[in-house]
Amino acid sequence: MYLLSRFVRKLEPKKFGRKKKSSNLCFWAFAGKCKGLYELFYGYSFRKADDCQRKRLRMEHKKKWDEMLGILLLALSAGLLGVSAFLCAGSDLWYDEVFTMGLASRPFGELVSITARDVHPPLYYMLVKLLIAVPGKIGMHQAAAAKLVSVLPFFFCLLYAFLKVKKLFGMFTAGLFSFLILTMPQLADYTVEVRMYGWALFFVTAGMLHAYEWVSAGERKNEDASLSFGKAKIKACEKEFTQEAKGHRKKNVRYINWCAMTGLLLAACYTHYFACVAAGMVYLYLWIALWQEQRLKEEGKAFMLSGLLCGAGYLPWVLAVVTRQVGQVKENYWIQPLSWRSLGGCVKFLFQPFFSHKTLNIIIAVLLFSCYAALFVWSVFRGCGGSRRIGLKDMVSRGKDFEGIKGYNAVRKGLFTQKDCGVQTDLWGKGELLDRRKAFFSVGCAGVLAGLVAFGFLASFLIRPVFVYRYMLPALGVFWLGFAVMVSCYLNKKYMVMPLMAFLLVIGLRNYRAFYGEEMWKKIQMDGAEGVFSQIENEDIVVCNFDQVQAMAAYYLPNEIYLWYGEPEPLVCQMYPQSHGLVEGEFSDEAGIRKLRKLLDSGRRVWFMGSGNARDEIIEKWERAGIGADEQASAMVERYWFNLYKIFYENE
């Protein structure tokens, strides 16, 4: 390699005026790579290399380490996702997951009909129904198969990180983003929860990436073919690169991104209503970005067509269902009222980790929030990286020209080097353009979450409470993607990045460790609960005092299950017909005891799954009426503790 590098140094052209034949371009590209490899791995410095070449070699050396760190983070994330897939073996479900499984067991027509009376769109339930069919045929438990369906969107996020984020922002950003979406507070839980939040997160994140690639694939309006690179006109570059980029890449890439973005954001709308809000914020980002690039007139028709197609695709569901659901929400809904203190709860949900010490959790949450806020403010007022003054004013500037873009592309493609061109420049213009786009993208990512929260609070204040903290999850993918992009802008400042990376690794791994321990504990508890359920025979009758425990029991048991106090939710009764209220009409203790006596007189065994402190009060009332309850076992399913009692007449 040494002899080859010496040979290349002697033979390479000394001036820009000496032309390289097109047939020799591959040879010179290969030779240049050999020089770079020798410089990186053996520390040899060419005596005749100028300062620009040495600077380029140092930057390539730093880039190698950044890429290596990104690869390690991506590999670690893939391993963590594999652990999540392993944890799907558990069959424990809570109330909302039981609701999902009930819908997935219905025919498609009935599924849509029930969903129309629920508070979520139907796409996720259809996905679960389709995707659990194959594992169910090979003997896998349906709950485990449904949990694997929740792993899939995070797998797709990692795939997008490797294919899209790496292409747009670099390998380091791809690895850090992959790590963050699996380990930051709250997110690991949803890799195995049988709900739609992981899919909503993926659809919004992928749509945002396609929107950014759409923006970055085009050229600013004031970039024409006459742009010069210093004193040299890059005619040869335009033959080899510019025409191809304008003709093939520009049209095809934008068309692909247009189709993918439209489809993904429409899917987000049909997955969760707050994902629909996030999709609207993505369109807002795209509109402002195109305006800032002075391409709104050129791309306006495509932008409007995408929005119209997405809206038209969602309009039938809005007209047929959403208006009726809004009326139901106005009358009665389970979400508690919000206050301005709830904003602090949002911050806590986003940043508080899961260490065992409460005070330590608060301190780390404050530090993590401060890191995000500092990077965000710095990106707004100084631009991505802070090395150039590209603040908020410049970010929305529309009239500034960026010289040297064609020359930058020529150098980047390896057709010429800066030394060959004889140009004394550091390609400042192209770097500024990239920094502007990155900074504005980071602001847009945070803006998606901010818009979603603002809509939730506004609707809660004007209509009635409709927002809970987990409804932020559809926007958390882009939220942490923006953070990863901001961190990557400071890779040249190792004194900042390395402590921050260590801090994120400690928080992320501790969060995932807590998640893993909790899931393993739930699995052990579920094994014990299955032993408790085995005591109940198919002909027996079960009485519950909590509607969520009743729904959970109806999923695991085929028995007739009655609810003490009130009526179960009508949709649950439709999905699980063995669920009943103990008393028809208004409930009273006397009516409940009369019904319980009838069940005992039927000759079948009657069991009581008592949960909470109310079970002791209920048993005391029964004892005063001559009905006894003998505790047989206690168990936990997911988050529900209950005691199992055998009910009998005390005089028998």
Image (tube, rainbow, N blue to C red):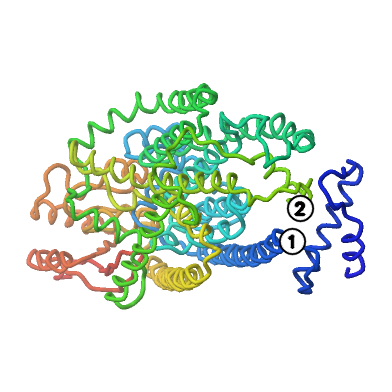
Instruction: Locate residue 405, reporting x and y percent.
Output: 64, 40
Quadrant housing the C terminus: bottom left
Mark 2: which amino acid?
Lys
Q: Quadrant of residue 511?
A: bottom left
Mark 1: which amino acid?
Asp
Q: Nearer the viewer, residue 292 or 562?
A: 292
**Residue at image mark 2:** 419
Q: Is residue 460 visible?
A: yes
**235 lies above or below 479:** above
Q: Secondary structure at mark 2?
A: helix
- Marks 1 and 2, the one that precedes in the sequence: 1
Q: Nearer the viewer, residue 607 or 279?
A: 279
Q: Nearer the viewer, residue 381 or 553?
A: 381
- Mark 1 crowd level (few <14, some 14–19, many ≥20, 10 Å Cα): few
Instruction: Locate residue 632, reporting x and y percent.
Output: 29, 74
Q: Secondary structure at mark 1?
A: loop
Instruction: Locate residue 67, reporting x and y percent.
Output: 64, 62
Callout 1 touching callout 2 (CB < 8 Å): yes
**Residue at image mark 1:** 50
Q: Residue at x 87, y 45 (%)?
A: 18
Locate residue 548 relative to residue 231 in the image: left or right.
left
